[in-house]
Amino acid sequence: MDKQWFASQVLHARAMATRRHSMLKSFFSAAALASAVIAFSAPAAAQMERVPDRPAGEGEGPYDTLLIKGATMIDGTGAPPEGPVSILVEGNRIARILRGGADIPADRVIDASGMYILPGFVDTHGHNGDPSKAPQPSYGFKLWLTHGVTSVRGVGFGFGPDDPSLDQKRRSAANTITAPRLFAYTAPGDVWPNGAVGTPQQGREWVRWIANRGYDGIKFFNNEDPATLAAILDESDKLGLGTVAHLGQRGVAEVNARAATELGLDGVTHFYGHFESLLDGAALPQYPADYNYLDEQSRFAWVARLADQVGDPGTEQWSAYIDHLIENDATLSPTFNIYSASRDVMKARNMEWHEKYTLPSLMQFYAPSLTNHGSYYHDWTSEDEVAWRNFYRKWFDLTREFKDRGGRVTAGSDPGYIYQTWGFAYIGELEMLREAGLTPLEVIQAATINGAREIYEPKGEEPPMGSIKEGKLADLVIVPENPLANLKVLYGTGHTRLNRETNTLETVGGVRWTIKDGIVFDARALLKDVADMVEMQKLRENAIMQSQQAE
């Protein structure tokens, strides 16, 4: 029996949500336990599993006519909320926006009275390709959808000649898998059969090769010399491919964010390259004598101290750098959330969703490790956390001033590292954008139309999603509570508060429906599927442990 097929059948055969828990328990009865151990005790697969086909009943539609009735609309453009509004969807497109909340006949009606409707969120920094963490990609895909994310830019979803990105992109576009809309980026020299890219000519050939196969853009890690980087950027611009860079420290002495955007880079993600462009009184960062880039405790503890080597906000140097970014049409996707454990690792380790929704294998990957990338808090001290809190202040200031002066900021989560679990990490990023100084409407704008434009602008097109407009794709999020008042209501676990009339705790919020391409997904049902995946892995591991103890 094929193990991947067997696992997918266990996950999807449950016909009704009310029966799922009991069926999982009965599956792992004493009689079934031995066969489960045999099926899953083999060494972990070297590759990610194939995403199963979307089963019947998982997502409904698209409908000839779908009416979403009576909601308050936050359209993503930065316009104020308005309601009641009814939205008529025909197939996979928004056909009419009926202000005043008109009630007209439709094949399906969703009564969203008292709720809020927004454009589907865009995650501009996605990964989903490490079998040691979460071997089934649908785990991440469902968590994204559960949190209202209907589009993800994968930077990348996988690597090497067997990269599944294009296959997953096509299947998602055809709606044959349960997944957000996917955009595939890859790194220079990856995925093609000709090896590393070491010259400008090779760089141009590689760009043409990936463009012909359907990739949407390029993710740089700052491994190219300036001439090769310039050639790749020039060729990608000609062919309508997007570009974004993690300007890693190995290359930042030659190419910081100022230099990269001067050469034509579209977007800068994380913080790398910014502070190196703002050094006060030095051409290069000053590293401690015992610094070792390959020791991630050293690397990540030290990088926060880089904030002490740059000037303060408001200085002439600071202002000139922001002017430069704006003049060169750069986009910032800061991914504040992915490093947030650095300022409070205990909090990150104990987030309330880990027990039920984070896979045991993922929690094991997160734990301090000499080999797992991002698991760098080997001996993380209060001094390290204070350094990171101070670092964030300047990083927040830079991002806010860039935004205030007209720069585009987008929302990316970089999930699967440093206690940042898919979906939950994205809402965490929205909260941190708010902490950085974006207003609630600006946060929603960053999460919707800004992200869509970052993806589509290199193609020379206005995005077909990212705002609620007649004629746009029906990528929508329906939430029972107002996210402008409290972004926490977007978490799958909702927001817990005290009911002051009854003096009891209550949980409110959580996305109710996510609509992608006109298909209506029950966000709560998807979250229950994820909980079942986690429970299944726990039961499997317990079964293996019991079998080993019995030997």
Image (cartoon, grey):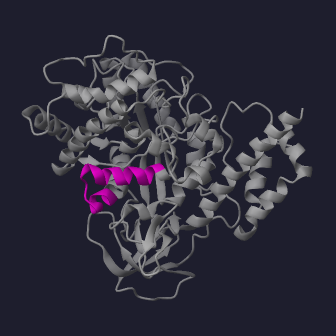
- In front: 289, or 533? 289
Question: Residue 472 location, x and y as percent?
Answer: 40, 65
Residue lying at the far right of the rendered structure: 31
Residue lying at the far front of the rendered structure: 503
Q: Is residue 439 magenta?
A: yes
Residue 317 in sight in this render = yes
Residue lying at the far left of the rendered structure: 316
On the rendered image, what quadrant is the N terminus found in? top right
* Magenta segment: 425-445
Question: Residue 476 location, x and y as percent?
Answer: 45, 66
The picture quadrant where one finds residue 302 is top left
Q: Is residue 242 above or below residue 57?
A: above
Q: Which secondary structure type mostly characterizes the magenta part of the structure?
A: helix
Residue at 72% in and 33% down: 45
Residue at 52% in and 69% down: 512
On the rendered image, what quadrant is the C terminus found in? top right
